[in-house]
Image: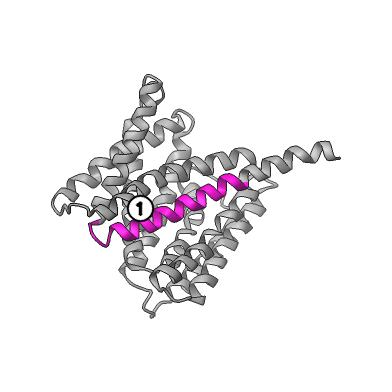
Amino acid sequence: MAATTLPLQTNTLKAVAWMMGALASFTTMALAGRELTQEMSVFQALSFRSLICVAVLTAIAAFHRFEGIRTERMGLHLARNTIHFAGQFGWVYGLSLLPLAAVFSIEFTVPIWTAILAAMFLGEPFTRWRMIAVAMGFVGILIVVRPGAAMLDVAAFAVLGAAMAYAATYVFTRHMASTERPFAIVFWMNLIQLPLGLVPALNMWVTPSPENYIWIAAIGLGGLCSHWCVAHAMRHADAAVVAPMDFIRLPIIAVIGYLFYAEPWNPYVLFGGVLIFAGNMVNLWGERPRR
């Protein structure tokens, strides 16, 4: 018995370690976005992020003689990354105006929108479990934004739009995965998004203050490290093990928001986030027999 359970325990521990790295990266990105947008536009912050990612990825691609970035589906890359850039803009814009916990709670709706879009465009079945997850997600959104309350403003809708854009990006990725290498998808994502952020940023450019250099590095490297860590976590454990750990982001960011930005504890945001995440887990659990 011990001989069969030891590898599983070792893999699970590795998955936990990688997810801790992902949580740290996501949190660092959120803080960097909040800090940078106090001084510069969202476009400029995103252009710095893309610039750092392009520099790192180009160095890696050059080491492999640019073999991993070839593509014959540039049109899909352009469409995917234009949508993804819009999502990133909405997410960072929300970080600059909303409590951090509210942004993360609304972001947890991404799997719900992905299920809807995958059913519409990829022909994936819209099972009863997915319907339950969607219903729980919508109720959770209503609890978080509370129509008629102060939370219901442009920033909240921007983050909700970002979640939809991220979901559309995932659908594009599923469609492209059969022909495109993961490295190529990430490389073209950052290269395409660099001018999308840089061109409008030039009209409102602000020279960064020296204390923000660390945040510029953080938003770029955090973006790369977060996806790298999640991908490795998925290699060492099933999604049913990895996905619940992602929810730890919500209480962590709530504590950080309280300590560093004096953001009050909002039970509606936390409860709505729990309900949204529970809907995701219901869908994950219900889909296991079909998979």
**For residue 263, what is the image quadrant?**
bottom left
Instruction: Report x, y in % for residue 116.
Output: 49, 53
- Name of the residue lying farthest toward the bottom: 148
- Name of the residue lying farthest toward the right: 1
Q: Is residue 164 left or right of residue 131?
A: left
In the rendered structure, which segment of residues is drawn in magenta?
Answer: 16-41
Instruction: Report x, y in % for residue 65.
Output: 37, 19
Q: Is residue 171 magenta?
A: no
Q: Is residue 67 above or below residue 93?
A: above
Instruction: Report x, y in % for residue 170.
Output: 45, 45
Q: What residue is pinned by disc 1?
A: 87
Q: Is residue 30 magenta?
A: yes
**For residue 145, what is the image quadrant?**
bottom left
Answer whether residue 13 is visible to the viewer in this image: yes
Answer whether residue 77 is visible to the viewer in this image: no
At horizontal 39% and vertical 44% (from top left) the residue drawn is 221
